[in-house]
Amino acid sequence: MERVYHILGFLLLALGLPPCTTKRFHDVLGSERHPGFTREHNPLPGWSSDENDWNEKLYPVWNLGDARWENSWKGGRVQAVLTSDSPALLGSNITFVVNLVFPRCQKEDANGDIVYEKNCRNESGLSPDPYVYNWSKDGVWGNDMDQSQHVFPDGRPFPQPHRWKKWNFIYIFHTHGQYFQKLGRCSARVSINTSSLTLGPQVMEVTIYRRHGRAYLPIAQVKDVYVVTDQIPVFVTMFQKNDRNSSDETFLRDLPIVFDVLIHDPSHFLNNSAIYYKWNFGDNTGLFISNNHTSNHTYVLNGTFNLNLTVQAAVPRPCPSPLSTPSLGLAGDNSLELSQISDESCQIYRFGYFKATITIVDGILEVNIIQITDVPMPGAQPDNSLVDFTVAFRGTIPTEVCTIIADPTCQTTQNVVCSPVDVDEMRLLSMRRAFNGPGTYCVNFTLQDDASLALTSTLISIPGKDTAFPLRMAHGALISLSCLAIIVTVIAALMYKKHKKYRPIENHSGHVIKSKGLHACLHHTKAAIFPGNHEKNPLLQDKRGIP
């Protein structure tokens, strides 16, 4: 009999007919192998080997370019968008999310059916039928007498009916030579623990099927690259009061820079870890070690400095069996270390690194209004009052000064004036500004040069012509923080026009996270008005000359 089978096989080959073969998951999924692909993988909990057989009768397989894709969905093609929270630290969980994007005017309703959006016109105009697919009234799908079609591609049965009644899509995730299948609606989510994954870039592929009578049709395929790393993904933001543009990595001398370390840990793998930050600011001030993710540092010299940060996390984990204790070696700056502590628990050490080169220059460090005086008018002009302001500053000489005059709530801008700076021998600025009638005004002065921007604000009261009291500072000139919102917005708009060129945001380890455009300017301006590092309040500090 065995000889007969061999003869039949040779005859099939001679006639050019392919032998009857059953497709396996790896034949259907992952036809494109990324560099470094190997069939040897550690098993993922809850996942299955792609050596399993694929039920092609229930789940037909179409190659790319097959004309049947064009008719797999009413009204056009369905697109799938695959995202993940990569990069993932080895040992943490990584989550993948697939979202289906339906053709124009289509959406999924609360019952899981696909319907047309009201008053939405596509290429065919308004549809008289509200449903694209009315699956909830599909008698075939709801008939529980025959469960032979209610199975996944590998033959495993669907969950209990009450759980999958509104789930009309089948998602098959595939990575590391293994697959995971689940029912879902227009979105599906899967999480994997990375302890068994290989370090480096990996590929996740997803194939989506929809219900079609007693079988299923493929509607979309998508893939994405994710990264598993043994180094903590570290990002650092840098901010300094009066710095005009932190995205250029140029900061001011004699003002503290705030460094804020952001650790990418979406699965909270490091929540119970002891984390330490070791700073070397590159200016021969030595090492600074802290368990606080925020650090301040002031450079007192101009120049270029190389900043280095090492983040260490001690992650608690169960100790290995005493019968199989591994050889661990000495502790040091290795990406993976295991040490035993007194309470018989163990730790894995993970490290992250950040480097940056920053430039320190001179800039405007501080600005204060020191005198406000009323300008006598030669004639009776009650609707136009002139006021002289004297402003003192510390640091480099500014190139331009802008004045913003707003209503008492600082919500409505009334006048904005920008002009070159005229500085006297005592490094004081004298500015004359006009006010339209009596009342209380919110006044802001902003001084700037190529590298810095500093400001000060106050409230003043302009008396009427019959008032016995002259010009005075309103309510002690203390402006509440909420009242400065309009000032922040106006200054941001002015600076955006003058400083449009920003370097792009770089969200990867080893580079500063940078802000762009109006958002960056608004952030800087807010911080300049609302200092958070115990520096002097920029409001009026010297009341000389004010009655």
Image: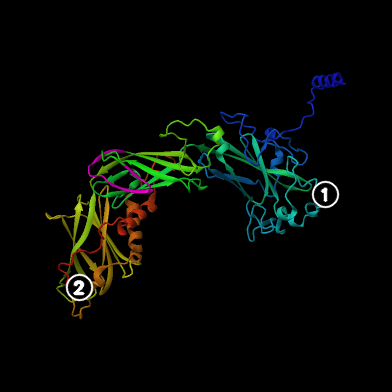
Magenta stretch, residue numbers: 288-306
The answer to which image quadrant residue 331 occupies is top left
The mark nearer the N terminus, 2 or 1, is 1
* Picture coordinates of residue 267, whole percent (x, y): 52, 47
Residue type at tag 1:
Asp
The answer to which image quadrant residue 46 occupies is top right
* Picture coordinates of residue 165, whole percent (x, y): 73, 54
Q: Residue at coordinates 74% horizontally, 33% vertically from top-left?
A: 23
Q: Residue at coordinates 38% horizontally, 47% vertically from top-left?
A: 291
From the viewer's perspective, tell me whether residue 136 is left or right of residue 435. right
From the viewer's perspective, tell me whether residue 311 is left or right of residue 366. right
* Picture coordinates of residue 316, whole percent (x, y): 49, 43
Could you say whether the residue bearing mark 1 is in a helix, strand or loop? Answer: loop
Q: Which mark is residue 146?
A: 1
Q: Which mark is residue 471?
A: 2
The answer to whether residue 138 shows anywhere in this view is yes
The answer to whether residue 445 shows anywhere in this view is no
For label 2, the crowd category at 10 Å Cα-Cα, with few meaning under 14, some 14 to 19 and many 20 or more, is: many
Up/down of 252 relative to 332, above or below? below
* Picture coordinates of residue 45, whole percent (x, y): 63, 41
Q: CA distance from mark 2 to mark 1?
A: 90 Å
From the viewer's perspective, tell me whether residue 18 is left or right of residue 416. right
Q: Residue at coordinates 57% horizontally, 42% vertically from top-left?
A: 193
Residue type at tag 2:
Leu
Q: Is residue 480 magenta?
A: no
Q: Is residue 293 magenta?
A: yes
Contact, mark 2 vs mark 1 (Cβ under 8 Å):
no
Q: Nearer the viewer, residue 511 or 372?
A: 511
Mark 2 against mark 1, which lies toward the viewer? Answer: 1
Q: Residue at coordinates 38% horizontally, 50% vertically from top-left?
A: 517
Could you say whether the residue bearing mark 2 is in a helix, strand or loop? Answer: loop
